[in-house]
Image (cartoon, rainbow, N blue to C red):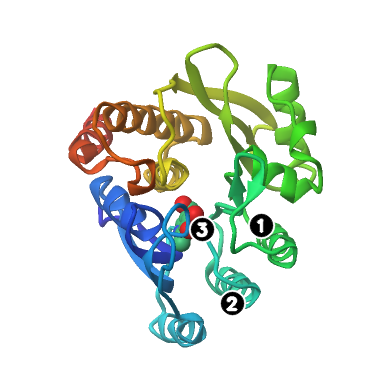
């Protein structure tokens, strides 16, 4: 079987571990071909470094889309993340409309913020545009802050303390059951963290969780969503994919916590990629 193929629309940040520097290695380790469409090149991500460079690649997005279409390329999924502008979101929406088809779900990580606040480059206007892009998704992977921004609620009103609360918010994000929702950062018992997963195919919300590692590291959300997207194209169900993502993210966070690494340098996942590959290949051999 040829490697399944994902088109990945994210920025490329040279230092700090996020977006494509996580997406490409994670998908490759899972036996998935990643076709990146970089939206911008930054010297570092924007979370914790001052004075980062920003080379806007928006002008490339339509020509790349047109070239890939002229080649008759098909993808097994499209996976999108951090966006630099409203225009990039409109071009990403065009890309989804061009390439999505049955068998090619659009996984939109509506990256906008964390810990109750939008990232410093996200204006209210951009958050509204992310809502429009996410409306085209088959699967979204918001954290609590992003869930609040998508729903137009205060972050404080999104309580994720009980299964019933989580079900309610995951379903509220599903656009009447039209898209699946993987609501991340859910902790229903002390010492564990994971996601509430509303699956539009079953209409059910299930829970994935793994041990909560001490410390919070940049790129954790990108790693989680990358593994989820990879597992989906490797034909795992939504809840199986979320469990694999929770397990691997937890393992990497635990490893990172044991190193003396500043938070802004990101999750130290590379030495564990072989385990992700082994897990998925061995399961498929069974
Ligand atoms: O991890 C999300 C992300 C991706 N890309 C860039 C970012 C961030 C979060 O800060 O700054 C450039």
The x, y position of residue 259, in whole percent, is 24, 31
Above or below 2: residue 26: above
The x, y position of residue 161, in whole percent, is 68, 19
Q: Earlier in the sequence, mark 2 or mark 3?
A: 3
The x, y position of residue 109, in whole percent, is 55, 52
Q: Quadrant of residue 42?
A: bottom left
Q: Is mark 3 within 8 Å of ligand 1?
A: yes
Which residue in the structure is indicated by mark 3?
Answer: 81
60 vs 200, left or right, is: left
Query: Farthest front residue?
Result: 50
Q: Residues within 10 Å of mark 3 (few under 14, many from 20)?
A: many
Q: Earlier in the sequence, mark 2 or mark 1?
A: 2
Which residue in the structure is indicated by mark 1?
Answer: 134
In-front residue for pair 205/153: 153
Q: CA distance from mark 1 to mark 3?
A: 10 Å
Q: Residues within 10 Å of mark 1 (few under 14, many from 20)?
A: many
Query: Farthest top residue?
Result: 190
283 vs 59, left or right, is: left
Q: Quadrant of residue 3?
A: bottom left
Which residue in the structure is indicated by mark 2?
Answer: 91
Q: State the residue at coordinates (40%, 23%).
A: 214
Above or below 109: residue 277: above
């Amino acid at each position: 079987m040829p490697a399944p193929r994902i088109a990945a629309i994210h920025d490329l940040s040279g230092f700090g571990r996020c977006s494509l520097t996580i997406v490409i290695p994670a998908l490759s380790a899972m036996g998935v071909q990643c076709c990146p469409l970089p939206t911008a090149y930054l010297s570092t991500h924007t979370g914790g470094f001052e004075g980062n460079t920003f080379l806007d690649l928006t002008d490339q997005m339509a020509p790349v889309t047109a070239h890939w279409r002229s080649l008759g390329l098909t993808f097994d999924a499209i996976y999108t993340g951090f966006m630099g502008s409203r225009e990039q979101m409109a071009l990403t929406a065009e890309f989804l409309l061009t390439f999505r088809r049955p068998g090619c779900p659009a996984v939109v990580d509506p990256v906008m913020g964390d810990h109750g606040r939008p990232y410093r480059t996200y204006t209210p206007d951009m958050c509204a545009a992310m809502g429009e892009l996410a409306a085209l998704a088959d699967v979204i992977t918001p954290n609590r802050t992003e869930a609040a921004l998508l729903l137009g609620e205060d972050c404080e009103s999104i309580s994720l303390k009980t299964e019933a609360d989580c079900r309610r918010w995951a379903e509220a994000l599903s656009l009447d059951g039209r898209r699946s929702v993987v609501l991340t950062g859910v902790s229903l018992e002390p010492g564990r963290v994971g996601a509430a997963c509303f699956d539009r195919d079953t209409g059910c919300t299930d829970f994935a969780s793994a041990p909560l590692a001490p410390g919070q590291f940049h790129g954790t959300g990108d790693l989680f969503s990358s593994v989820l997207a990879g597992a989906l194209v490797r034909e795992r169900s939504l809840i199986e994919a979320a469990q694999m993502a929770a397990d691997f993210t937890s393992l990497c966070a635990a490893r990172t916590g044991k190193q003396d690494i500043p938070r802004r340098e990101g999750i130290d996942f590379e030495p564990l990629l072989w385990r992700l590959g082994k897990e998925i290949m061995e399961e498929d051999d069974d």
